[in-house]
Image (cartoon, rainbow, N blue to C red):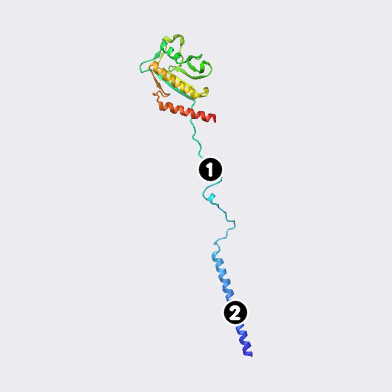
Amino acid sequence: MRIFLLGCVVLFAFILILAALKSRKVNTSATRRRRRDAPLFESSTPEKVVDADSALGLYEHDDTVMEEKPAAVAKIDYVIMHVMAPKEERFGGYRLLQTLLGCGLRLGRDKIFHRYCNNSWQEKYFSLTSVNRPGTFDLPNMNQFSCPGLTLFMVIEDCLQPLQSFDMMYRTAKQLAEELGGEVWDENREPIREPMVKMIRHDLEKQMMVTVV
């Protein structure tokens, strides 16, 4: 009987030892797993959350930031044309005066010619001077007056209708060149071409649109 009880005690002790060893093994494995998964350095600040839009550089109202600005329109303050006589020739005398008057030009108090709107003597399309300084005309002595060319010009801020003034000035320049036997030149005194005329008119039109807006 004593031998049986002693055997039971030994068996029970053996079972307890096995259970203790198994529990220690499990705890050791868990500790190793936690150490393996833990970061090398612990941060004292919270992790910053980065969303996909920020990572790609996209923000709210980004379409406004990326919107292209319209190209700036070069401001035109004035337009100049010349009607030049052939080389070694000149315009002058009463023929010049009659041609100017026939094109609707009138001599102003400043002694240069103007193309007025509807003969109002207030609003004008453009003005005309001699290429000789000071550019004025001596009406009482026109029979003795001569010049190698004429200058037509319009100041944009003085024109209520710049496009209409430009068209009128160009038509008059061509008419003068035809009747006097001259040639229409640009402000640099180079023969003017239709593409240049269209470009100037187009720029004026864009400028007027910007002004209206």
Tell me which corner region of the image, top left, top right, bottom left or bottom right, holds residue 195: top left
Q: Amino acid at mark 2?
A: Ile
Tell me which corner region of the image, top left, top right, bottom left or bottom right, holds residue 183: top left
Percent position of residue 156, x then y: 50, 24
Does 124 appear above or below 18? above
Q: Residue at x 42, y 27 (%)?
A: 196
Q: Residue at x 61, y 82 (%)?
A: 13
Q: Which mark is residue 89?
A: none
Percent position of residue 37, x then y: 54, 64
For marks 1 and 2, give the one nearer the viewer. Answer: 1
Q: CA distance from mark 1 to mark 2?
A: 73 Å
Contact flag, marks 1 and 2 (Cβ < 8 Å): no
The C terminus - image quarter: top right
Question: Callout 2: few (<14), some (14-19), or many (20+) C-alpha neighbours within 10 Å?
Answer: few
For the view shown, which residue lies furthest in the left direction? 88
The N terminus - image quarter: bottom right
Q: Which mark is residue 63?
A: 1
Compared across the picture, whether 157 is left or right of 1 comes to left
Marks counted in the figure total: 2
Camera-nearest residue between 193 and 118? 118
Does 167 appear above or below 57? above
Compared across the picture, whether 96 is left or right of 33 comes to left
Helix, strand or loop for disc 2: helix
Q: Which mark is residue 17?
A: 2
Q: Amino acid at mark 1?
A: Asp
Helix, strand or loop for disc 1: helix
Q: Residue at x 64, y 90 (%)?
A: 2
Percent position of residue 99, x then y: 43, 14
